[in-house]
Amino acid sequence: MKFLLTFIVLIALVALLEAKKGEHTRSNHPTWKNHTRSHKLKFKSEEDEIKAFNNYDDVDDKIQTHNSDNSSSFKMGHNEFSTWSKKDHAKHKGSINLEALQAPSNKRDVLPGLTYFYGQNHTFQNYGATPGFVLPASVDWVKSGWNTPVRNQLQCGDCWAFATTASIEASIWKQNKATVTLSPQQLTDCSFAYGNNGCNGGVVAFAYGYMNDVGLAEEQYYPFVGQQTNCNFAGVSSKPLYKVSKYYRVQPNNDTALMEALVKFGPLPVAIDASSDAFSYYKSGLFGSVSGQCTQNTDHAVLLTGYGVDTKGNKFWTIKNQWGPTWGVNGFMNISRKVNNNCGISSQVFIPVL
């Protein structure tokens, strides 16, 4: 009798979850089955599948509503995260705002003659715009030859580690045209003493500090596993380690300085506001061209690969994300640069020097 009651309650719960979505169910939704097949989704239970479907159907409604607005400068679309909950998405971002950190009592040297510590007193050598420097109309480092596969940080908030490794990989390529793939997992596991917090967030500058002292191994020797693990530096200490000799901070909120740095140094790690559904499900077009689509409160680190002007005369930045190739235009996004520091893009940018 007890088993029968439990079974009836379970059936009722499943029916309630299914009915929550109104007219759409798993069986009659026009795109659900295709989505599960194309992304090879597997579920532990029917209840888990229904929860995933409810998330997907919510996202689908938002996508359809947005895309019906012909005045919008960008389109939204499904990706591999369309079944994720808000809590899942929160784990997906992890760029810590440098100025928001509180200063602890300890301090350490990073650049010769400069004192480095957390919070408002955090001091870097700024890189500002050079008077008289002529900026080219456009820059595209991907078309110039630097083009590595789009990576996927999964449900680990170590975007800062991926942005760091990508920027160093680009610097190596720019210096000698060599292609290497470095280990974000090593940064995720091993740079806590430098201020980072693994899958719960970090700062590119802190990662550079770690690389300045310790060095970073290649991905093949310290592979990515999608979660924080115990630091295994001992396992790579005998391997080639790539170091940063010094690094600068691009003068905050200065798009001109950022453009110049991008021209001179190559792809750079930037922090941006990725908090909206529109960002999470961006598919194509120009993002951030209308006030309110993003703010200057940054929460996600990506790689800036270029800037330019489209055929309609719209100025844009191009970023490379690490949410896999199903996000955006094969992993890339164009962000409007109609206003200075749009989406916080020039708030927190660091230049590595090998």
Image (spheres, rainbow, N blue to C red):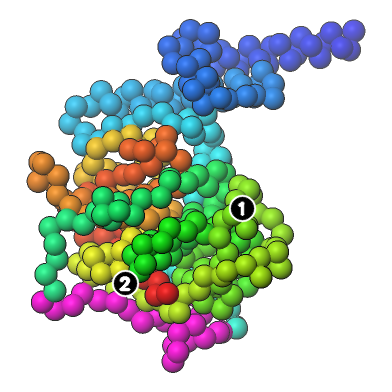
Name the residue at 74% across, 15% down: 10
Q: Amino acid at mark 2?
A: Val
Q: Looking at the image, which residue sits at the far right? A: 1
Which secondary structure class fits the magenta region best? loop
- Give coordinates of residue 170: x percent, y percent: 38, 61
Q: Cβ–Cβ below 8 Å for labels 1 and 2?
A: no
| Left/right of residue 285 with respect to residue 315 in the rendered view | right
**Mark 1 surroundings: few (<14), some (14-19) or many (≥20) residues within 10 A:** some
Q: Which marked residue is nearer to the observer: mark 1 or mark 2?
A: 1
- Give coordinates of residue 237: x percent, y percent: 66, 70
Residue at the disc numbered 2:
250
The disc, 1 or 2, on the residue closer to the chain's N-terminal end is: 1
Residue at the disc numbered 1:
223
Element under disc 2: strand
The CA distance from mark 1 to mark 2 is: 31 Å
Element under disc 1: loop
Where's the C terminus, which quadrant? bottom left
Name the residue at 61% across, 53% down: 223
Above or below, 18 relative to 221: above
Q: Looking at the image, which residue sits at the far bottom? A: 113
Q: Which residues are magenta?
A: 107-132
Q: Quadrant of residue 134?
A: bottom left
Q: Amino acid at mark 1?
A: Pro
